[in-house]
Image (cartoon, helix red, strand yellow):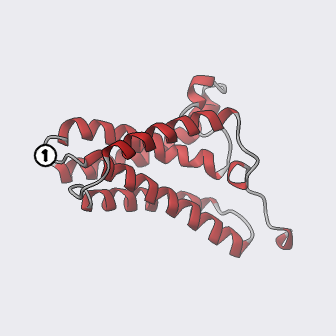
Amino acid sequence: MLKKYEIISTFVIMILGTLLHFTYELSNENVLISLFSSVNESVWEHLKLLYFPSLLMSLIGYFYFRKNHSNYLCAKTKGILLSFTFIITFFYTYTGILGKSIAFLDISSFFIAVIIGQVYSFKKIDNPCNQKLTVITIILLTIAFILFTFYPPTLGIFNKPVPCFWHK
């Protein structure tokens, strides 16, 4: 049952994440929708497309599987963090080499990141971990995504990517 749920979750995360790319604009820039949708093309905002669907599916799964897998939520949180790491590393590596962003690679990296996070968390589902740290991580990430939607720091990850100067 767990394996089936994880496979279904993978596809749900991919579909919801893809839809969330468009919901802010389609909602006429609704403030409530901006909390969990991408409001611009920055890498940070695109991480929301992975985070909120993954969190939703993780919380649903937690209520079903926590009795038999007490570290379920912890494994899922680690999987989300690994997915973030892949997206950020892949994006900045390939854009650093090519000097520009390519939509196909960005979309593909999202799907690959979802799969990586889901497979990793499935394999680590019964490994011991710190439950308090997991809850703190989820709370801090959720606050950060909401807060930085309205008050983004002046760091590159919060800015819309631009071509490198040598490729103009």
- Determine the image quadrant of residue 22: top right
User: Residue at label 1?
Assistant: 68
Question: Is residue 143 visible in this depiction of the protein?
Answer: yes
Q: Amino acid at mark 1?
A: Asn
Please report the residue visible at 13 percent of the width from the left and 46 percent of the height from the top. 68
Q: Position of residue 86 (x, y in %)?
A: 50, 63
State the count of labels.
1
24 vs 12: above or below: above
Crowd rating for badge 1 (residues with CA inside 10 Å; few <14, some 14–19, many 20+): few
Please report the residue visible at 34 percent of the width from the left and 56 percent of the height from the top. 118
115 vs 49: above or below: below
- Determine the image quadrant of residue 54: top left
Q: Is residue 53 left or right of residue 163?
A: left
Nearest the viewer among 89 and 134 is 134
Q: Position of residue 7 (x, y in %)?
A: 27, 53
Under tag 1, what secondary structure? loop
- Determine the image quadrant of residue 62: top left
Please report the residue visible at 82 percent of the width from the left and 72 percent of the height from the top. 167
Nearest the viewer among 73 and 29 is 73
Q: Quadrant of the C terminus?
A: bottom right
Q: Position of residue 52 (x, y in %)?
A: 46, 39
Q: Position of residue 53 (x, y in %)?
A: 42, 41
Question: Is residue 37 visible in this depiction of the protein?
Answer: no
